[in-house]
Amino acid sequence: MSPLDVPEPFGARLRLAMDTRGPLCVGIDPHASLLADWGLNDDVAGLERFTRTVVEALADRVAVLKPQSAFFERFGSRGIAVLEKAVAEARAAGALVLMDAKRGDIGSTMGAYAATYLEKGSPLFSDAVTVSPYLGFGSLRPALDAAVLGGCGVFVLALTSNPEGAEVQRATTADGRSLAQLMLDHMAAENAGAEPLGSVGAVVGATLGDAGVDLAINGPLLAPGIGAQGATPADLPRVFGAAVGNVVPSVSRGVLRHGPDVAALRASADRFASEIREAVAPR
């Protein structure tokens, strides 16, 4: 690969998107209950209408759209076809697409997941994907390498917003670090020297209160939990401290409940983006 063929790193593209569109990620989570709230059937037609509306409303204004793969997979191949179309259309409209798939495996299987989401030419090629490191951080190497080649990002689970996560993530390693801190340290090593932002991000729940770990990984921090899960933009400085400028807060139901009206979806996303900008602005 010649220098001219090297894609712009995801971290640089994300930093630009955050600076120009605001640091907001909106999840595309077509729960059956949410489809019903929109007056849609819990079938492929309802899924397609829901997804098309969200992409139409938001892909030209938010930094990141984050489809949750499971809610498409449950409809089989026709659901995956809806997801493929949504990814392509969202990226064409200027949004970065973070595939929320939380994949984690070893060897050739991890390589296959990486090829699915991080290799150009794949029908599900995305700007980034979420992964689980709890088979060992080294098990993620196929995804990390594919991300570099594709100019993509990888968001690694560190401290998640679900209460059950603590029994694994807060467990202490032999050298006294929490398992979450060990994973964060690996991420920092991957991002060393990257400017303006590394392409390996961490998933850290906005509902945690004091995270209690060193979040200086020189990479983005995806923060689920804003809105329906109880966290607010005003909580971000307390949770993330000095790293708050690299936070990408994720909102799903807080925005999507305003559908299917396109104008209402846009107004809600704009409101969250404005509140987040204010919360993370340097003091």
Image (tube, rainbow, N blue to C red):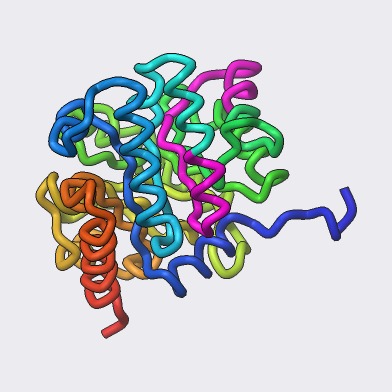
| 233 shown above or below 98 | below
Quadrant containing the C terminus is: bottom left
> Does residue 245 appear to the left or right of 85 in the view shown?
left
Residue at the image point whose x is 41% and y is 36% from the top: 100
Residue at the image point whose x is 57% and y is 25% from the top: 113
Asked if residue 109 lies in the magenta stretch, the reply is yes
Foreground pick, 53 / 271: 53
Foreground pick, 237 / 89: 89
Can residue 71 be seen here? The reply is yes
Can residue 207 be seen here? The reply is no
Residue at the image point whose x is 46% and y is 44% from the top: 98
Q: Residue furthest right?
A: 2
Asked if residue 258 lies in the magenta stretch, the reply is no
Q: Which residue lies furthest to the left in this view?
A: 230
Q: Where is residue 218 in the image (x, y as percent from the top left)?
A: 49, 61
Q: Where is residue 79 in the image (x, y as percent from the top left)?
A: 42, 23
Foreground pick, 255 / 221: 255
Residue at the image point whose x is 30% and y is 29% from the top: 46
> Does residue 50 appear to the left or right of 52 in the view shown?
left
Q: Position of residue 59 (x, y in %)?
A: 43, 55
| 230 shown above or below 41 | below
User: Dividing the picture into quarters, in which one does residue 216 lie?
Assistant: bottom left
> Does residue 109 appear to the left or right of 271 in the view shown?
right
User: Dividing the picture into quarters, in which one does residue 6 lie?
Assistant: bottom right
| 69 shown above or below 241 | above
Count of all numbered marks drawn on residues in the image:
0
Span colored in magenta: 86-113
User: Dividing the picture into quarters, in which one does residue 158 lie?
Assistant: top left
Q: Where is residue 72 in the image (x, y as percent from the top left)?
A: 38, 25
Q: Residue furthest bottom?
A: 283
